[in-house]
């Protein structure tokens, strides 16, 4: 088994927060850096990460491009009753991860936007958890319930409570602490009161809930355009398949900020 193999889980119990886009960007960044990377899609119903990689394979073949590819698995939930389902899902995913760790340095798990036994099993395996949160007061409630007038915490969310339980389990069995990152995503380039409030609330929650806050990744058309080709911002910069703009450079710098926060040292410049 690779002693230093790390499991990065991209999780949020809300759909549309950019989990799959972030997952593929992290995977390709680490591949370009020289790591052996595997990806796991736990959202078999939506399958966004899987479709992204399928598009990447097709585009690379069509254009005769030598693009780095992660080893990719889709893990689907079992069909048993609730209690048995929970055990089956956890055992299946644990076995897949154990096997992947014998060959790969980094395993990136993309989770569905709703709670499930399988998603929970993914979170339990995380060494590093990244929770992307859209730049909206509506989306912060995945982490905590906020008073609309005072902007103070009313209570922690069920998702946060679940992470606390996972942290306790890791401590009880002697594992390293779970490193939880909350990433403010899809930030508008137009200054607004809502935007400032989101930033202030997440800075406050960072101290109270014990996560590391990154602000963040901008809302860019280029991310939507890259999906059909299966490309990432790094591919565009390295292959020259598109005209490079200031927006491309800014997007790469945002990705580097995320990578630096994760603190898995890059083996070579990307």
Image (cartoon, rainbow, N blue to C red):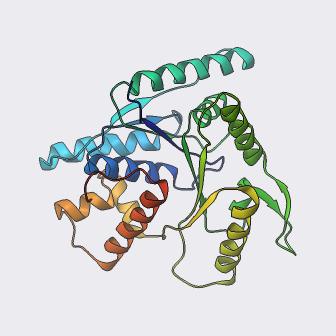
> Left of 190 or right of it: where is 53?
left
Vertical arrangement, residue 171 with respect to residue 128, above or below: above
Residue lying at the far left in this picture: please name it.
64
Q: Nearer the viewer, residue 45 or 206?
A: 206
Q: Could you say where residue 197 lies in the image, as x and y percent from the top left?
A: 71, 77
Q: Is residue 104 above or below residue 258?
A: above
Residue drawn at 25 percent across, 55 percent down = 268
| Residue 38 is at least partly visible in this image | yes
Q: Position of residue 246 (x, y in %)?
A: 32, 79
Task: Using the rendered image of the protein, determine whether residue 78 is visible from the camera's viewpoint.
Answer: no
Say left or right for 79 vs 160: left
For the N terminus, the quadrant is top left
Q: Is residue 241 left or right of residue 94?
A: left
Q: Quadrant of residue 260?
A: bottom left
Q: Is residue 143 above or below residue 111?
A: below
Image quarter hosting the C terminus: bottom left
Residue at the spot 66% in from the left edge and 17% down from the top edge: 87
């Amino acid at each position: 088994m690779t002693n230093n193999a790390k499991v990065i889980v991209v999780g949020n119990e809300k759909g549309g927060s950019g989990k799959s886009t972030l997952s593929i960007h992290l995977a390709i960044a680490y591949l370009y850096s020289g790591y052996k990377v595997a990806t796991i899609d736990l959202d078999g119903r939506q399958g966004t990460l899987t479709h992204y990689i399928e598009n990447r394979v097709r585009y690379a073949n069509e254009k005769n491009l030598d693009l780095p590819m992660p080893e990719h698995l889709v893990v689907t939930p079992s069909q048993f009753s609730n209690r048995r389902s929970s055990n089956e899902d956890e055992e299946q995913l644990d076995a897949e991860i154990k096997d992947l760790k014998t060959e790969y340095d980094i395993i990136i798990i993309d989770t569905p936007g709703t709670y499930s036994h399988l998603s929970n099993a993914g979170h339990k395996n995380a060494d590093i958890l990244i929770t992307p949160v859209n730049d909206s007061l509506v989306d912060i409630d995945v982490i905590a319930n906020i008073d609309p007038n005072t902007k103070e915490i009313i209570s922690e969310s069920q998702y946060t409570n679940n992470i606390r339980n996972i942290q306790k389990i890791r401590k009880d069995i002697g594992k390293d602490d779970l490193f939880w990152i909350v990433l403010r995503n899809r930030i508008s380039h137009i200054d607004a009161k809502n935007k400032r409030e989101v930033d202030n609330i997440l800075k406050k929650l960072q101290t109270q809930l014990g996560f590391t806050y990154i602000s963040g990744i901008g809302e860019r058309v280029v991310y939507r355009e890259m999906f059909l080709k299966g490309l990432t911002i790094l591919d565009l910069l390295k292959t020259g398949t598109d005209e490079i703009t200031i927006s491309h450079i800014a997007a790469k710098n945002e990705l580097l900020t995320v990578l630096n926060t994760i603190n898995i040292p890059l083996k070579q410049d990307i």
